[in-house]
Amino acid sequence: MPNSTNDILADAGHRSSETEFYTPLPDGYERGKTRYVVVMGTVMSGLGKGIFSSSLAKLLKDKGLRVAPIKMEGYLNLDSGTLNPYRHGEVFVLDDGMETDMDLGTYERMLDQNLTGDNFVTSGQVYRRVLDKERHGGYLGRDVQMIPHVTGEVKYMLRQLAVKQQADVVFVEVGGTVGDFENGFYIEALRELAFEEGERSVCFVALTYVIEPQALGEQKSKAAQLGVKRMMELGVQPHMIACRATNEVNDTVREKIAMFTNVPMRRVFSMHDRDSIYTIPEDMHRQALDIEILSLLDMHSRVRPAAEDKARHQWGRFVEQLTNPHRHQIKIGITGKYATLRDAYASIDKAIEHCSAHLNADIDVQWIDTGELDASTEAIAELLAPLNGIIVPGGFGARGTEAKIACVRYARENRTPYLGICLGFQMAVVEYARHVCGMTDAASSEFDTHAARAVIDILPEQKKIEGLGGNMRLGGKDVQITANTRAVMLFGNARAVRRRFRHRYEVDPQYIDELTAHGLIFSGRHPDQPIMQILELPHDQHPYFLGAQFHPELTSRPLDPSPLFMGLTAAAIQHANPDLPPEKISPRYLPDPNHHTVDA
Ligand code: GLN
């Protein structure tokens, strides 16, 4: 008769065909080495589980611990590639090409850490693994069940992540809310995991919501209590509660929540609305949540205090730069099909925020829905004249493309700083071909399948692959930077960078000579194939006209902002203050006006 969890695990491994336990362990897994923090939502979704989880993970990372976040999605899609950003927010692409939920962006930015497909799980992935295993005879004649097989697979994936990323702490975020049909098996798997790993190995956090009905004018905790109770019904006792609320949650309410959920009041955290989410880690530290976690998981001995001081100082400086009043005021317009929904461009929004802190600027972002736009020159001019910078971001399909081309033309001709991202890069090529090279019929075959001159065309190697999801050029790729260009200056003289791509179309190589003969510079290229990745105009012709076939916003980090966004913002500040010398704005991101070419 096994008498400890260890024995159960060992035993289950040997007798997996007979026992009710099904807990395959990945090679190299050492029980006790990795701890787990599990964040689940109650009452409603969209409360910021990712923000809570990443902030807490950051605090532990700053203490020298290795952290690995993982998002577990309830939906059946294998990845987020086919999801509509209008409904789900942007598709965030990881370096390994995995297309994920925008929350992974929050983790990468907060932790300043590249993640992989191992940090992102969907129900579809779990079921696929189980079904594949079943077809390969992996269950030794047993009927395959939600418990223990599906839950066993979930536990396996979590432990595999722990091994692969050598994590001290795995931060698990369960998508949706407790009580949803589709995430129930995750919660059961995590309950089992906590049992198997033993005491002080898993810390459960319930994120809940404290309502403040206007008519009452006071905070009410009942919904929060009921939400947490729901979690307890599933066999999970939270160790910590984070309360989302409009205003700071008062002591009476925290006390009530503590009392009805068996969680000491010091572990009931108020996560109220604030100017910047980046202040949350410091707030957690002030309330000693980091110490609480270390105690709950018995991890004090793994902390390196020296690392912590430096990290907290750097972060504190960034938060100050972001939240203090700014010297410059600028307006940047972003065109796009999903302009009504900020989440669809979450990383662009964040990249701009990073620049705002580093360049001391208030950036008023104006979203322009090109789907609704009159593409006539006058209408465009009226709309864009008040702007100091224009971004045409990524996008798919034909809708709004003519208006986008008109926006590019306005920016080029009126010397308004311009950054084209992916589709915005392609639109800049079409615009240049039409209006500078005289190819009036130039187009992209994405929106004009019979274009006489498709300067933007489908990638040759992709032409063969049909169907959605799987025919895109995805993930981190090397970009070779040309000497004596704005790009090389922006990248601090680096001659090679790695950036993330997500596209099907590209510049048709047969038009490269003609475009460059008319003055367009391709300053970033694939190291050995004729794939154009950055374009620009010389700075004596235009203060900032740049496009990237990749998505610079995906790798912009609070302490390491995207150089292309920094270049745009610096140029926009100059546009708003023509008399201000560039060195007063940013010598690093603006060219010296006395030189006609930039020294590489
Ligand atoms: N639709 C374009 C392509 O597939 C651009 C993609 C994008 O902007 N992400 O190449």
Image (cartoon, grey):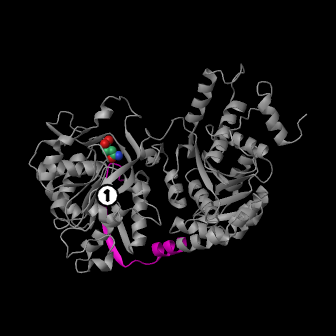
Residue 426 in sight from this viewpoint: yes
Question: Which residue reaches farthest right?
Answer: 1
Disc 1 C-beta below 8 A from ligand 1: no
Element under label 1?
strand
Locate residue 385 relative to residue 156 in the image: left or right.
left
Residue 247 in sight from this viewpoint: no
Determine whether 294 is above or below 229 in the image: below
- Please rate how many residues cluster around mark 1, counting C-alpha atoms within 10 Å: few if below 14, some from 14 to 19, many from 20: many
Q: Is residue 317 magenta?
A: yes
| Image quarter where ligand 1 lies | top left
In the picture, the quarter occupied by the C terminus is: bottom left
Q: Which residues are magenta?
A: 315-339
Locate residue 436 relative to residue 575 in the image: left or right.
left
Q: How many marks?
A: 1
Out of 338 and 159, give the one closest to the viewer.
159
Out of 239 and 580, give the one closest to the viewer.
580
Q: Position of residue 285 (x, y in %)?
A: 65, 69
Per the image, the residue denoted by label 1 is: 334
Q: Is residue 402 magenta?
A: no
Locate residue 495 relative to residue 175 in the image: left or right.
left
Out of 108 and 288, give the one closest to the viewer.
108
Q: Position of residue 255 (x, y in %)?
A: 75, 65
Determine whether 99 is above or below 270 in the image: above
* Tag 1: amino acid: Ile
Q: Residue at x 24, y 51 (%)?
A: 404
Question: Which residue reaches farthest left?
Answer: 438
In the picture, the quarter occupied by the N terminus is: top right
Q: Position of residue 64 (x, y in %)?
A: 64, 63
Locate residue 398 relative to residue 173 in the image: left or right.
left
Q: Residue at x 67, y 38 (%)?
A: 156
